[in-house]
Amino acid sequence: MTRRHPLLLVLCFLGLPAIADEGMWTLDNPPLQRIQEAYGMAPSAAWIDKAMHASVRLAAGCSGSFVSRKGLVLTNHHCAARCIEQLSDAQHDLLVEGVLAASAEQERQCPAMELNRLEQITDVTRAVIDATAGLDGEAYKQARNAVQARLTSECAGADARRTRCDVVDLYHGGQYKLYRYRRFQDVRLVFAPERIAAFFGGDPDNFNFPRFDLDMALLRVYEDGRPAEVRDYFPVSAQGPAAGQLVFVTGHPGSTQRELTMARLSTMRTLTLPETLLRLAEYRGVLEQYSGGGAEPARYAAGELFGVENSYKALRGRLETLLDPQAFEAKRQEEAALRAYAAAHAGLKTDSAGAWDAIEQAEVAFREQYRPLAALEFGNPFLTEYFRIARVLVRGAAERPLPNAKRLPEYADAGLPEVEARLFSKAPIYPEFEKLRLAFALSKMRESLGADHPTVRQVLGKDSPGQLAARLVDGTHLGDVALRRRLWDGGQAAIDASDDPFIRFVVALDPQARALRKRYEAQIESVEQKSAERIARVRFARTGAEHYPDATFSLRLSYGKVAGWQEGETQVEPFTRFAGAFERATGSDPFRLPDSWLRARNSIDPAKPLNFVTTNDIIGGNSGSPVVDSQGALVGLIFDGNIRSLGGAFLYDGARNRAVAVDSAAILEAMEKIYHAGALAREMRAE
Amino acid sequence: MTRRHPLLLVLCFLGLPAIADEGMWTLDNPPLQRIQEAYGMAPSAAWIDKAMHASVRLAAGCSGSFVSRKGLVLTNHHCAARCIEQLSDAQHDLLVEGVLAASAEQERQCPAMELNRLEQITDVTRAVIDATAGLDGEAYKQARNAVQARLTSECAGADARRTRCDVVDLYHGGQYKLYRYRRFQDVRLVFAPERIAAFFGGDPDNFNFPRFDLDMALLRVYEDGRPAEVRDYFPVSAQGPAAGQLVFVTGHPGSTQRELTMARLSTMRTLTLPETLLRLAEYRGVLEQYSGGGAEPARYAAGELFGVENSYKALRGRLETLLDPQAFEAKRQEEAALRAYAAAHAGLKTDSAGAWDAIEQAEVAFREQYRPLAALEFGNPFLTEYFRIARVLVRGAAERPLPNAKRLPEYADAGLPEVEARLFSKAPIYPEFEKLRLAFALSKMRESLGADHPTVRQVLGKDSPGQLAARLVDGTHLGDVALRRRLWDGGQAAIDASDDPFIRFVVALDPQARALRKRYEAQIESVEQKSAERIARVRFARTGAEHYPDATFSLRLSYGKVAGWQEGETQVEPFTRFAGAFERATGSDPFRLPDSWLRARNSIDPAKPLNFVTTNDIIGGNSGSPVVDSQGALVGLIFDGNIRSLGGAFLYDGARNRAVAVDSAAILEAMEKIYHAGALAREMRAE
């Protein structure tokens, strides 16, 4: 919390949104001139077209890329970890053992994984703006949902199983674009090293550098039961990049908050980030202690614990940035400059009048409504698979009979294939672990709303959180995929007739949860979206298309170079090497190298680069992104950012913000020398 | 975090530190005129003298009072809980069962409890100021330690076992007072209800109201093996107080931060409170999950879990107040007004010039030094009894041979009787629980300082936190009180010769820990203490003695009345009654009433008051304080504050800040009807 951002003052003086290697640019607006000026070259249209088609999105929240013409996809181990866990059992924990499919027959399907490849971007700004013109509150929200449902449905046409379309809100209402994807739902696990090799250093080293991680996994996309043939892919370089080299990252940064108003940042600083972090910290303690109870609990909880620790550290970095007086002041000045610009230009003044104030008023309401929303509606509030499944069944039964345009957006036609794939996933559910999570969530709901809140009294009755959790989990049959399918197909009548305790639990709570959401959308979200559209017009008037939109988990291009940085007195070198991993290993978790590495030690080239850092502007969601050179070869695999990158949610600090990648040379070296995966390595390798 | 403080604006306008029923007043400066003006009466000198001698401090961090001439002491159950736990074993968990000594023989000694009764207050401001005049940094700190050691040693004289003297820093250097106490170290457990009766509603209801808690325990002070005869005590009223009645609280509020500069508040807001809370939240999760593992783990961890949850909620309330923009702005204006006053008065201007800025500079250094200090020096950084014991042995061996004035202050003669009582306590230590806590602390040290910090590398070497914790705990013999005594008596030679792993662990770390502390004292603490003295002079020049000092765990008087408050739309009534407890009970923890209550239900008067709230200004440390009427009868027992009182660390909000007490009528009713403790009740009862 004591760190300083030397670039901030520059930012304030310039008042410009993008400098240095900053920016997560859409592929239809690449910053060619900036790249040309900074590096003396810029990618061609063909390069960009290929990059778009060779990049993929893991719908659950990661990035990846094709690395062979036979549908082979390279991503991070931590992006494939859920699949690896789901394909494990008490005999074989593949997170511990690693996995290598020696033949196509051994490539097993991930229970619920969807990959998307972007095919086309179409501007639909006019259609969205026109559809909501003159509307407010609930009417605005409904019209917006309706036009999006129509656009995405028309775009996907009859083939929603293979085509997915999303309306992407860019620049907070400055542009609406229709992103059409090729959807892949048959994704199989090909290769993963042991988790301790992928995540060597564990949580202590997470978001740090130097690093020594082989955070990779290989998946393969199938069509009609055969490996998909793809035209565009990135061949993997056996050399990796050189220091100072220009590199590109194509990937799907999840979300940034660089364009949010001060009112919204204040809410994050004083309410949502502290609340979320404190909850995560406690949950982390519960999970740590639970995991220590044996190999099976450790296996059940591994994915959740990783996710919690990763989010905890990332959000903590964000809070530190917002609590930094200099950073907060820089954001304040940025907003003041934009407001002054709007006030000084007659047309803008009228259009944007009151937009910032409207958001501030909406935030006052949001702060009042936040706790019940977080307890009952946002995300997966009861932390359990059973609850998530039950809610999809209950809401699906109510929403699917409605016209597409009238549904809750997550049940619109465009989204249903993904919803169904997750709903019918054969992934195992661990009842004991479900109880733990549900009891924790119930007890935190009581803490957040108070023991005397009517909803808390209704939910708990005479039960303690542990008693209720045990009763629900012991009584449910939602672990049975066939039952889920019957309830889904049976619609409202099946839900009404079900006496499954989780279904009844959701049915009893849903009116309140929906009412909270509706009020939130009418009083807060719609006000903020409308106001943001106005502010976006000011920003465009001021800087044209010479800026990039906040991240929205849609494909972006970033550019930069391989480079270390200065950390206090220390110059951090841009590369680590295999030798360093062996030096750092203590033999104790999380600094333990797997036996496979120890056995192969003499055959590995110790000087070969293992990880490196670049100045590319990335954020969570970019995990698994390819690092590509100007020739279109894959030279690295993004898996992390350094600790200084966490403030990147709000601002980019070119002096110290670094993306962290696995070197492509290390990928091939490890596959060949450690994992005896020579055939796969040859499939990926650039000639 | 969205709450508003309607009083703040008034505060700003008046610029006065005390209004309404605000203030924790020293007993040599009682606000008689304010009380007279507000309530038409004021306590006499005799009343105050009696109140001083009838009040006691529990040296470990609570308050209490004598309630009979035979040395009977009334305090909270949660203040006696450590003793109750220490007198328990696997056969009899007295926290679960409750305890009632039917005769003097059954009154068992608490393993390490010290009570202090204030006898005399002497002004030593001149002596302290003169001793440090013209000195800076380390020299200032040493001179200050030396004069305090001399004053306390002279005050206690030859009889340090029975007399304890503390130099109390009031008004942050505005006054230094010598507090002379009668020290009692033979304290025995007389009565305690079941914990679920004392803490009905548990953590969910903690810091809330309405409440239904019998949070009481009775101890007895012994002298020479017999119950101590005391002259001054508060007889217990069978009626309790009436709504609106003027009541006083005498007790030992631990610490408030109302007079701190904005620089120090900023550090709390952005660094120390978030860090501490996140650590506590995670530790809480670990302890919850550990406690769920069975009756024995639950018994080991009960006290720690209560303490962690209590601190967590209290500190969270503080952070919410500091993150409240209006509250923070009010504090800013308060400081600005004081600085303006100083600048406008020539003499003050010279004296105080640079004081605020010096503190701000010191805080910059503090923020840099905070993490290592917290990891290695502050409090009990490794969370374990063994570490605490080992550090006392190692430092005691080094410090005790030095002249009294040259020692670390906690090893000065005045403090040694308490140090020894704790060191030689026969209280059980649970090795399994020690491992858990040490492993957690080690892992958080690594997280806070980073895996590559030299101290972390030195401490952990090739071990994981769990491996090191197991090795130290399995290898130590410090659970043996006789060994501790030999090491204490054997001094440096015994320490040098010891191969106990905890002793070696402390010996290896201590040079770094001491160096951190020394730098902190020289660069930060001494600068801030000196500067605070200057600011205190400004405050005295502005308001004379018409203000009260920040809390310092020394005896204070507060006044107020029994009164509910308005919470949003709800008018909260000031009293709860026995009937309410039975209505609220669900049968599930923590809303479960003990069998003793259920059995006695028909004989208890359901309309009898159980708990009540008052406007008295209190804070943590006041637990166990008597609520006394103007006749000197005890009408209540403070055990909590409401949620609005948590911001009281920084400001008092008379409209909503409430102290929460057990009604004296409920105390007698429960003892007679539920616990069959009629003889004890008669001993306490006012005629």
Image (spheres, coloured by chain):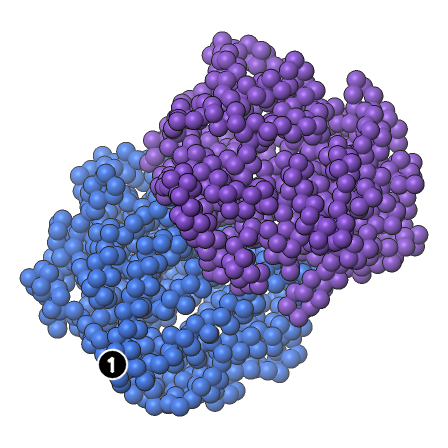
Chain colours: A blue, B purple
Q: Does the image show residue B459?
A: no
Q: Nearer the viewer, residue A221 or B79?
A: B79
Residue extending furthest toward the front: B346
Q: Position of residue B502 (x, y in %)?
A: 50, 23
Q: Position of residue B72 (x, y in %)?
A: 81, 32
Please name the residue that numbered disc 1 is placed on: A345
Secondary element at tag 1: loop
Q: Nearer the viewer, residue B551 or A622?
A: B551
Q: Quadrant of the C terminus of chain A?
A: bottom left
Q: Does the image show residue B232?
A: yes
Residue drawn at (12%, 72%) of the image: A46
Residue drawn at (48%, 28%) of the image: B129
Q: Position of residue A486 (x, y in %)?
A: 56, 76
Q: Is residue B223 above or below residue A110?
A: above
Q: Position of residue A209 (x, y in %)?
A: 28, 45
Residue drawn at (67%, 45%) of the image: B31
Q: Quadrant of residue B234?
A: top right
Q: Is residue A648 above or below residue A293?
A: below
The amino acid sitting under disc 1 is His
Instruction: Tell me: B273 left or right of A643.
Output: right
Q: Nearer the viewer, residue A472 or A129?
A: A129
Q: Is residue A104 above or below residue A539?
A: above
Residue drawn at (90%, 50%) of the image: B600
What's the chain of the residue with tag 1?
A
**How many badges with numbers are in the image?**
1
